[in-house]
Image (tube, rainbow, N blue to C red):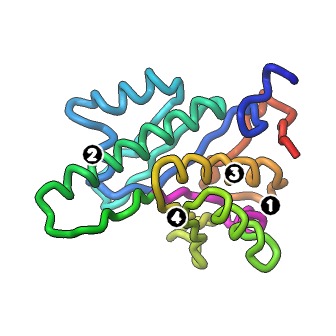
Amino acid sequence: MDPKVTEGGLNVTLTIRLLMHGKEVGSIIGKKGETVKKMREESGARINISEGNCPERIVTITGPTDAIFKAFAMIAFKFEEDINNSMTNSPATSKPPVTLRLVVPASQCGSLIGKGGSKIKEIRESTGAQVQVAGDMLPNSTERAVTISGMPDAIIQCVKQICVVMLEVEYKGSVKNNEFERSDQFSEVFVSK
């Protein structure tokens, strides 16, 4: 087996973007930026957070697939920790799932959903995560939000499968604000069948 082929059959550089509310962004940044700094160092991924006072911000994660998956794992487990901390003084008995929102080019959403919803159903069943593709595009964009909910491990497996689907898809036309893309330095995508 080629040592460049990592778990999930991928060895490429990716950029994936997440849409987050202010409180979520604050959790990822941490006090004086310590949390995001630690995530960058431990995952090896570049993690950039958009500037601004708007209610939602874009978190961009770039790097080799293994670094991206480590960064996603750290974010998912951080959100789970936040949920657990908020539950300690709460009368609620059921714990809400961890939820992440990916920003995906609308031109790739059809492949993610699959014919008659077959691909998204397969991803849901194999990972245990809930996955929903928004019907409408994000404001002033040619992209849609893909919401993933579940336990952190399920979310990580789901993100891996979404990456495989996205990398198999040829881009159709130009995409405004597209940053979910292959790096030009890699001409091949290794996908295990």
Assign a secondary structure to mark 1: loop
Per the image, the residue denoted by label 2 is 26
Q: Is residue 146 left or right of residue 193?
A: left
Q: Rounded to the nearest whole Å, what is the CA distance between mark 1 and mark 4?
A: 24 Å
Mark nearer the N terminus (2 vs 4)? 2
Q: Where residue 35 sits: x, y (%)?
A: 31, 32
Q: Rounded to the nearest whole Å, what is the CA distance between mark 3 and mark 4?
A: 14 Å
At horizontal 88% and vertical 46% (from top left) the residue drawn is: 193
Q: Where residue 78 sits: x, y (%)?
A: 35, 42
Camera-side mark, 2 or 1: 2
Magenta residue span: 100-112
Per the image, the residue denoted by label 1 is 173
Mark nearer the N terminus (2 vs 1)? 2
Q: Are marks 3 and 1 in contact (CB under 8 Å)?
A: no
The amino acid sitting under disc 4 is: Thr
Camera-side mark, 2 or 4: 4
Q: Is residue 107 left or right of residue 84?
A: right
Assign a secondary structure to mark 2: helix
Camera-side mark, 3 or 1: 3
Residue 110, picture quadrant: bottom right
Quarter of the N terminus within the rendering:
top right
Assign a secondary structure to mark 3: helix
Few, some or many residues within 10 Å of mark 4 (<14, 14–19, 20+): some
Per the image, the residue denoted by label 3 is 161
